[in-house]
Amino acid sequence: MTDVNGDGKADVVGFGNAGVYVSLSTGTGFTSPSLWVKQYGHDAGGGRVTKHPRMMADVNGDGKADVVGFSDDGVYYSLSQKTSFASPVHAIQKFGYVADGWRIDKHPRMMADINGDGKADIVGFANNGVHVSLSPLSK
């Protein structure tokens, strides 16, 4: 549950085989689920639950939650466009399953605004300590 269209109401977001589905909040219920972006789905090779965390966070500070996906070769994001998510952008070649050996059962990765600029940053807990990547995006 997170606000993907910036209206102040939490929407339902689900990661499925075909991609990322969203049901927008109407204030009294939710719209029917619709596919907003395919690339993070299991069928598109965009994520395996056992390897690739996928989450929602506002990475550009515009008040809308965006998709963040950790993959074999690093981190991808798709910005919310209020009615869909943009095509994935390869943000950084770090925190990846193959590229850097990050594992779900050993190395938590999450999103949090650690420098107070209103944008979610990557925080990862590795064998050798905490790794941080600040969001370079703007509204």
Image (tube, rainbow, N blue to C red):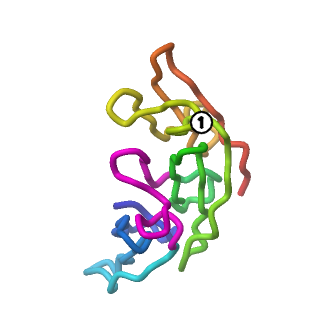
Q: Residue furthest left?
A: 28
Q: Residue at x 49, y 76 (%)?
A: 36
Relative side of 68 to 108, left or right: right
Quadrant for the N terminus in the image: bottom left
**What residue sits right under mark 1 in the picture?**
99
Q: Which residue is drawn at 59% across and 28% down?
A: 132
Please provide percent x and percent y for residue 19: 44, 71
Please provide percent x and percent y for residue 16: 35, 68
| Placement of 138 over or under 124, stated as above or below | below
Crowding around mark 1 (Cα neighbors within 10 Å: few <14, some 14 to 19, many 20+) is: few
| Placement of 127 over or under 12, stated as above or below | above
| Residue placed most toward the observer, 41 or 36 | 41
Q: Which residue lies furthest to the bottom in this view?
A: 32
Tell me where the magenta segment starts and ends, as one range: 38-57
| Residue 48 on the magenta segment | yes
| Residue placed most toward the observer, 21 or 100 | 100
| Residue 62 on the magenta segment | no
What predominant SS class does the magenta segment belong to?
A: loop
| Residue placed most toward the observer, 118 or 4 | 4
Residue 113 visible in the snapshot? no
Please provide percent x and percent y for residue 58: 55, 53
| Placement of 46 over or under 50, stated as above or below | below
Q: Residue at x 36, y 77 (%)?
A: 23
